[in-house]
Image (cartoon, rainbow, N blue to C red):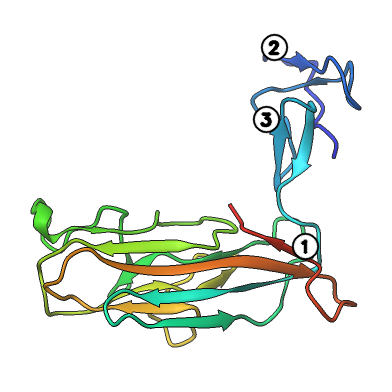
Amino acid sequence: MTLKPADMESCTPKARCLGGTNNGIAYDPGDPCPANSTFDPVACDCINSVPDYEQARWTGTLTNGFDGTVSLYTSSWYDVSNEGDYMMIGGAWLRGLELDADYCDFPGIASTCWSFPNPGINKWRATVVAVDNSIAFGGYSKYMGSLGINQNPNPETLSANPPILVMPNTSETGVIYRIDGVWEFKNFSDSTPQATWEGL
């Protein structure tokens, strides 16, 4: 993959490759690569971190630590052929609000806290985990997951795509909920997956 060329007219720091296919090429060390790629300092090159295919789907398992059930799910194929397209598994939500990673049922009371996935856009996130450390019980259940295509999904909505876990408020602590998966990729002309990736 090609490094982004440095702006030689600006007075910003530059770096130069001292070997490899980009030997002698100058680049901006603060922003060396195009979208969906990462910088490999050993090769002095940009590595495509998202497999380059036209379609993607999620496949994996849902583990409900409260009732002990484990289920399998594989999504439909979705078009990710446009530059910047992404998919993601959503975080935890309660009554229309996405919850912070350290959400507490009663703010400031440590015995009512949960551990949730980071909220917001997390492109190509394939696995999310929540831990119920709260002694609080009753009230509304929390929801985690949902497959988002170019958006942060809300698993509570009627149009939400699986995989989704419902997490009730119980007095038990240390209950773990998991959505573990990978991304599979193919082109429109392929009938079977051509690549598997654990995501970011």
The span from disc 2 to disc 3 (Cα, nearest Å) is: 15 Å
| Percent position of residue 129, x then y | 39, 62
Question: Label 3 crowding class (10 Å Cα cut-off): few <14, some 14-19, many 20+?
Answer: few
Circle number at residue 11: 2
The number of discs equals 3
For residue 182, which quarter of the picture?
bottom right
Tell me whether circle 2 and circle 3 mark residues in contact (CB < 8 Å): no
Q: What is the secondary structure assignment of the residue under circle 1?
A: loop
- Where does label 3 land, which residue? 31
Q: Is residue 155 at all visible to an observer of this figure?
A: no
Question: Label 2 crowding class (10 Å Cα cut-off): few <14, some 14-19, many 20+?
Answer: few
| Percent position of residue 173, x then y | 17, 65
- The amino acid sitting under disc 1 is Asn
Q: Is residue 115 at all visible to an observer of this figure?
A: yes
Q: What is the secondary structure assignment of the residue under circle 2?
A: loop
Q: If the image is split into quadrants, where does the N terminus sit?
A: top right
Q: Earlier in the sequence, mark 3 or mark 1?
A: 3
- Where does label 1 land, which residue? 82
